[in-house]
Structures are given as C-alpha cells and as structure tokens.
Amino acid sequence: MASLRNSSAWQALAAHQRTIAGSRMRDLFAADAGRFNRFSLALDGLLLDYSKNSISRETMRLLCDLARQAEIEEWRDRMFSGRAINTTEGRPVLHVALRNRSRRAIEVDGEDVMAKVEATLGRMLAFAEAVRDGSRTGATGKPITDVVNIGIGGSHLGPAMACRALKPFQRDDLHLHFVANVDASQISETLDGLDPATTLFIVASKSFTSAETMTNAATAKSWLIEALGGQAPARHFVALSSNAEAAAVFGIEPANQFEFWDWVGGRFSLWSVIGLAIAIAIGAERFEELLSGAHTMDEHFRAAPLAENMPVILGLLGVWYINFFAAESHAVIPYDQRLELLPAYLRQAEMESNGKGVTRGGEAVDCATAPILFGEAGTIGQHSFFQLLHQGTRLVPADFIAAAEPHHSLAGHHAILLANFFAQTEALMKGRDEAETRAELKKAGLTGEALEGLVPHKLFSGNRPTNSILLRRLDPYSLGMLIALYEHKVFVQGVIWEIDSFDQWGVELGKQLAKTVLRELQGNKPIDGHDSSTNGLINEYKRLTTKSS
C-alpha cells in the first residue's frame, strides 16, 4: 500500500504548512473582516466557529483534497448503507440506524434492520415509562425510586454522561446511580442507603461476560436476595445485552432482557437499549428528542459538501494539528457543569477508536493517530491546566462548548461564565506581545527593573487554536447533535489514517493476563512465572496481606 505521507494531498499540505506556520492568527483576523462568517457553520441551533485556527481558505481547500483522497464520502456511504466497515470483525457499524428517524431502509445481509430497531426501541421506552409511572414495581409492590446502572466503558460512560447533562429534565423522586469500577468501594457506597424494595438494577454488557460488570452485578444480586429473598431479582434486574443465554444463566428472564446487536459498538451505544437509564431518567418523549438531534447531525454529515460539513471540518482540523503541527493532545472544555462528564466520554470515543498503530490492511501506520484527549468543565479548568494552554511549550488545540441559555435563573452567573468562554478563546488566539505587556505594566505603576523583570513572565504567544461550539440551549435534542458531531469526527479521522475505528483489540491483552494473575493471587506461595517486576509486585502483595491478616 502506498504511504499516506507520500501521497500528493499530504505533500501539498506539508508544503502549505511551512508557509502558514509563521502566520499569526491575530494578523489573519486583522486582514479579513469576514473571517468569522467564512469559517463558521450553523445547524439547527448549533454553531461551530472554527475561525480561531491557523488556517486560510487554501488550508481548507487542501484539507478537503486530503479527505477526497481518503474517499471520505465513499466510506461514509458504506457506513450508512450497512456495509461491513469494521473490517477486523467483519461487522457493519450502524449506530446511525438506532436514531434513523426517517425510517429509511438500512440493510444488513439483505435484511432491513429498521423493523427490529423500532420494535426494540418501543419495548425499551414502554418499560422506561412503566418505571416512571410506578406500574413497574419491585417484588414487594412498591414503585421504583432508584435505578442503578451497572456497566463499564460505553455501557457506563454514555448513560452517565447523558443523565448528568440532562439533569434539568429529570424528576426529583427518581434517582439514577452508576457503577463501573470493580473496586468494591463504588458498589458498596452506591448500595449504602438504598432500599432494596425500591431499587432497580440495569446490567449493561454487550457480551455479558465483562469481569467488572458481572462482579458488580453478582454483588448487587446477593445484596438484594439477602434483603428480599431469592425470587426478588425477577422484579429488580434487567439485562441489556446481545448474549441472551448468559443473561439467562445469571438469572434474568427473557421478559427482562433488552437486545442490541453486534453492529452496535459499545462506545456508540447510548442510542440503543444501553440508553435505558437515560430513558428512565428523562422519559420516552425526551429520549426520542435525543435521537432526533443525533439524526439531524447524521443527515447533515451524510449530505453536506465536505467544505460545509461540521464533522468533516472538525476531523480535518484535528488531522491538521496532529500530523502537520505535531500536536500530541487535544482539550475539550465544556462551559457547562452538566457537561462535566463529556471529556471522559469523548476520551473513550477518540482514544479507543483511533488509538491504533496498524492500518486496515495490517500494515504499520506512517503517521501519528489519535491525540491524548483531556478536559474539564470551565471555569474550573482555567484554574487547573489553562496555564499550560496559554504559556506552555506544547501546542494543545482545544474545543470550547457552551449554551447561550441556562436552565437556572440565578442572576449574573451565566454572564460571568460566558464572558470567560468568549474571553479565553480570544486570549488563546491573540496572546499579548511585548509592547502590550509593557503598556499594561506601566499602567499598573511599574517602572525600571521591576517592570523589565516581569515582562517575560507576562508575555502570551497566542496563536493557540480553538474551536467554539455554541448551543442555543443544552437539551436532549442539542445533546444528540453534539454527540453525533463528535462521533462522525472520529470516523472521518480514522478513514484518513486508514485505520479501523470500530474495533478495540488493545483492551484484550491486559484482561487476558489478569485472569492468570487472579488465579495466582490465591494462597501464600511465591510466584516466579512473570518478569521480575510483576513477580516482585505480586509477592510483595502476598507478603503484605499475609502480615495484615
């Protein structure tokens, strides 16, 4: 296979980067009064401003050439048509079918999957409404007041993130809890204070074999049986899985199982029955609004020209900095506390999807792939890692996300929040040069050595790239749009890097080795079958636990 770095589109971008690398964004804005309008896109209440990037019209033209060379449009069409684009597992990738509000036929192996999707969605939403209206009771006849979602990875992060984001749309008398870590402190602290008679457990696992999930589920089951007896799990446990047999062995009856399919990847699954906790939290109507928002972004991604396509633009800008400016990380900073879990959710979406070093054809990639993604809610992040963003030695592109309208009525808070949102992207773009720094220090009354000593510390280089995403309001519809925007961005980058964004073989080896180590932790006999470090750690653990017992 020809090298991506030696391709004509790549070489053209590399040459162009050398000409634009010395440009300053503040000068680009000064020279072009229409820069914001030229480099921004709007879709149904969601605005993407990407003007604060080291780009010109020529940059975007060349990036779109790279997208065409990678056959982005063709790969996109393959995904939407149900082709097996997850090549290592031979599977379609059809989270888009789960929110296909057009009911357009989507076929897998000659079968239109939409009938199954709609039937399963209807069954899930009916169950959610039954929990909400009290008709789905526990074993003692009491209505459900607490729902515990037990999962890990996409079966945890998606529902937890969405429920936190959509808190204003939830009732005060129905509480959602999320357990993922096999560390017993999480499940024990969650169960502490809950009433077994009014608690529903959702066991969310595609394979129904994940060690963390099944260990936590077994603990919850024992807790319930101890309080209510052996028949209670039938009224207090439901399974979200593609492995009906394993769910039945655990003791969950078919009537309490909700299916999803192997063409739904875990980190793209909140639109499926994995979203049951979300549907219980916000209700069926609001959950369908979440799906509708994602579908709106799907249709935009499916039909918009590359140069006017939000996910394509975000994906290309990521490639621009990762591969042509050697940026190793990317920050996502939501200026909304309810989106505090979004960076963690997107971290999995990007790093598990595109953290690959091998192409679809099994060859080593010849360029950097996924960045290290991190972030925190603004303004908290400003007092944490923004020092590095502004004055550090590393280039860290960042996405800033905010909503124009708040859900609260506390005077002044939202204006202060958004003032910081707008000001931080301006500061990262413009910086502050030596003349401006001297003027500010003189205005503060400093002169002579005191002034000169502070000048280097007060300089801001600027030219730090940001994208700004402004929502009209954070609600189910806009959240659906936002998540789908990032899902498709990840897909675009994977296609350009020629990798399979939809497998995750990298998580397997450690899990396999852990099974061996778990057996070896039994008893006091020293271990010598690993490398000296692993042997030493296991044996020291045994010594410490033997001494403490």
Image (cartoon, grey):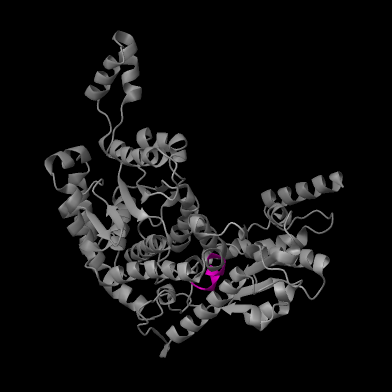
- Percent across and percent down for residue 134 are 64, 70
Instruction: Give x and y (percent) for residue 179.
Output: 64, 59
Asked whether, in this view, residue 182 is left or right of residue 420, the answer is right
Q: Position of residue 32 (x, y in %)?
A: 13, 44
Residue 486 visible in the displayed image: yes
Residue pictured at 31% horizontal, 49% vertical: 467
Depth check, front residue: 366 or 377: 377
Examine the image and state in which quarter residue 156 appears.
bottom right
Judged from this view, the residue extending furthest toward the top is 448
Residue 4 seen anywhere in this rendered image of the structure: no
| Residue placed most toward the observer, 14 or 159 | 159
Residue visible at 81% across and 74% down in the picture: 230
Q: Nearer the viewer, residue 413 or 360?
A: 413
Residue at 17%, 48% (x, y): give it. Answer: 35
Query: Which contiguous range is marked in magenta?
Result: 272-278
Left or right, residue 288 beside residue 421:
right
For the point 19% across and 45% down, the residue is 20
Residue placed most toward the observer, 55 or 114: 114
Secondary structure of the magenta portion, mostly?
A: helix
| 352 in the magenta segment | no
Q: Quadrant of the N terminus?
A: bottom left
Locate residue 35 relative to residue 485 in the image: left or right.
left
Instruction: Say if 501 sits above or below 183 in the image.
Output: below
| 274 drawn magenta | yes
